[in-house]
């Protein structure tokens, strides 16, 4: 681990930032008198604040650290996934937002139950939980190794201190605190990124334009390779993956849908979604640019890196060695804020799913006070699981954390977009056909993971289940895409073999257009 000293002033800035955040949690705690307010806010929050909250939730320390690391090591190809989000969003958000605000109470997966039954709801909510526990562990790990390198504290010690702050804030403040803290933390993240960008552009003697030209010439500002191949990580793999990512994130992810519900009106919820996604794309690009310029900074000038440093630690090293006192504290505050924003949101939304999809089903006559108390207990429990997952990352070294995040996201996607599209696009699709589609999807995912996942030390790596030429032949990111397609296609075809009444029109796109033509 590369350890870098940090000035007392910078430490005080970071501590003050965390204490302010916790103080805000205590302020909002006084207003959390019901489970509805705890999970969905007061429904008086302006659209711009909800939009910035969506933005802050989508970013986290994965953006702050893993995006620069990915661009430093390769190029901008992983950004293509994010660039697909606004393209897909323009076509779906006008329908998705009013649908959820009309047909669900709190849980996104209530729609799946109303359309296909209880199993569809349980299956999709479990997929959400697995995806977000893996993501939360990654975020906590990333910010902990960065702060450990500055402070000299053990990574696990930093992890525990941060976790206490995150869990305390989420337990106390609820969704209202999460949204307003996201606004502050999102602004800090943008400010920290712009500060680093300015130094990388203007400190080199050659000037900003020459520095940018060097990044282009070195192949760092590029989204290739452009081969139409699904076997390797190519532009087209990320385009297709990004389209399904957009559908899954904005159409089936509780952390986003819960914010639609917090808005005052359908119009405000749509506006918030657009603000969130366009701000996210801009900042994803900003941090990819930082990664590209870091490569130029350390490979064309007189500044060198320690021999044993890996890509994930280059940006923290730059912050500690190239930024002036005070600025380091501000950037570290932005890094901590990014982690707090994302993890607060995840903990609150996981708690909401636990209460709405499971606790209330087990105890249908529970009071609102019991719902609120259970919600807080589940925040604490989810926090412990988050720490456990992050601990598993401490000794991990590999292809880059962002690659791992995308890989796990593909595996745990579980065909959820296929379920969602089947429910929206076909009144004929029924639960029997869907469940067959889910079964085929599970078998396919098991086959793809087992025949493509390598284990063993370098030089003796082998796939878990070697079927020779029948091993899964494509890049692991395509696994998620195929799982969605399998659920949709198999589910639709299998539905034809079962006679059922057509779905209620208002749960489908058919009902939406029928209402529009009245």
Image (cartoon, rainbow, N blue to C red):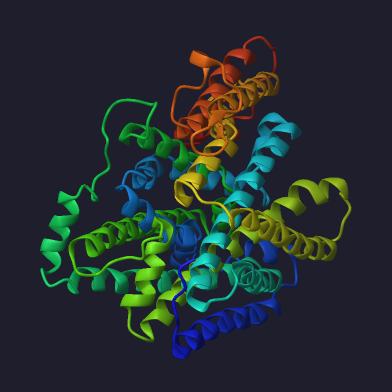
Q: Total marks drawn?
A: 0
Horizontal arrangement in the rendering, residue 81 relative to residue 515 (left or right) = left
Task: Say which of 409 and 450 sits in front.
Answer: 450
**Residue 190 appears in the picture as rendered:** no
Q: Is residue 135 above or below residue 55?
A: above
Question: Residue 383: which quarter of the image?
Answer: bottom right
- Report the residue at 29% width, 48% height from top: 75
Task: Say which of 398 and 131 sits in front.
Answer: 398
Task: Say which of 292 and 276 sits in front.
Answer: 292
**Which x, y percent locates residue 341?**
53, 66
Question: Residue 160: which quarter of the image?
Answer: bottom right
**Residue 320 appears in the picture as rendered:** yes
Horizontal arrangement in the rendering, residue 228 relative to residue 446 (left or right) = left
**Which x, y percent locates residue 127?**
64, 40
- Report the residue at 62% width, 11% height from top: 496
**Which x, y percent locates residue 332?**
45, 75
Task: Say which of 282 and 331 sits in front.
Answer: 331
Horizontal arrangement in the rendering, residue 121 relative to residue 277 (left or right) = right
- In the current view of this chain or complex, which residue is farthest to the front? 459
Question: Residue 141: which quarter of the image?
Answer: bottom right
Q: Is residue 415 above or below residue 337?
A: above
**Which x, y percent locates residue 91?**
39, 39
């Amino acid at each position: 681990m590369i350890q870098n000293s940090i000035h007392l002033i910078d430490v005080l800035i970071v501590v003050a930032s965390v204490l302010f955040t916790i103080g805000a949690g205590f302020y909002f705690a006084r207003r959390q008198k019901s489970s509805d307010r705890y999970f969905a806010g007061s429904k008086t929050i302006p659209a711009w604040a909800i939009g910035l909250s969506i933005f802050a939730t989508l970013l986290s320390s994965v953006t702050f650290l893993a995006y620069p690391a990915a661009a430093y090591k390769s190029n901008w190809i992983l950004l293509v996934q994010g660039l697909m989000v606004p393209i897909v969003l323009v076509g779906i958000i006008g329908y998705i937002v009013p649908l959820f605000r009309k047909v669900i109470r709190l849980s996104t997966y209530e729609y799946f139950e109303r359309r296909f039954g209880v199993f569809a709801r349980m299956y999709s909510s479990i997929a959400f939980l697995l995806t977000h526990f893996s993501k939360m562990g990654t975020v906590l790990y990333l910010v902990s190794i960065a702060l450990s390198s500055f402070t000299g504290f053990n990574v696990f010690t930093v992890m525990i201190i941060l976790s206490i702050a995150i869990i305390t804030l989420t337990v106390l403040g609820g969704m209202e605190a999460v949204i307003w803290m996201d606004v502050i933390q999102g602004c800090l993240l943008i400010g920290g990124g712009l500060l680093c960008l300015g130094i990388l552009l203007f400190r080199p003697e050659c000037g900003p334009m020459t520095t940018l030209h060097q990044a282009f010439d070195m192949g760092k500002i590029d989204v290739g390779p452009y081969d139409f191949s699904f076997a390797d990580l190519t532009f087209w793999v990320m385009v297709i993956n990004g389209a399904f990512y957009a559908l899954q994130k904005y159409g089936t992810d509780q952390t986003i849908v819960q914010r639609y519900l917090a808005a005052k009106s359908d119009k405000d919820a749509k506006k918030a979604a657009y603000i969130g996604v366009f701000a996210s794309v801009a900042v994803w690009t900003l941090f990819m640019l930082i990664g590209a310029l870091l490569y130029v900074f350390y490979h064309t000038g007189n500044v060198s890196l320690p021999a044993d440093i890996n890509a994930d630690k280059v940006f923290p090293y730059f912050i500690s060695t190239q930024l002036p006192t005070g600025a380091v504290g501000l950037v570290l505050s932005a890094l901590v804020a990014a982690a707090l924003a994302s993890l607060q949101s995840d903990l609150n939304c996981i708690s909401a799913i636990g209460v709405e999809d499971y606790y209330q089903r087990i105890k249908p006559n529970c009071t609102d006070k019991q719902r609120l108390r259970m919600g807080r207990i589940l925040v604490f429990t989810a926090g412990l699981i988050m720490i456990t997952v992050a601990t598993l990352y401490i000794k991990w070294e590999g292809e880059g954390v962002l690659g791992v995040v995308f890989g796990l996201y593909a595996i745990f996607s579980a065909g959820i977009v296929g379920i969602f599209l089947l429910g929206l696009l076909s009144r004929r699709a029924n639960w029997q056909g869907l469940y067959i589609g889910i079964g085929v999807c599970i078998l396919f995912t098991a086959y793809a993971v087992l025949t493509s996942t390598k284990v063993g030390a370098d030089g003796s790596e082998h796939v878990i289940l070697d079927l020779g030429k029948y091993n899964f032949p494509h890049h692991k990111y395509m696994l998620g895409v195929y799982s969605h397609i399998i659920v949709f296609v198999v589910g639709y075809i299998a539905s034809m073999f079962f006679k059922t009444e057509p779905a209620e029109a208002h749960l489908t796109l058919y009902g939406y257009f029928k209402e529009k033509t009245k």
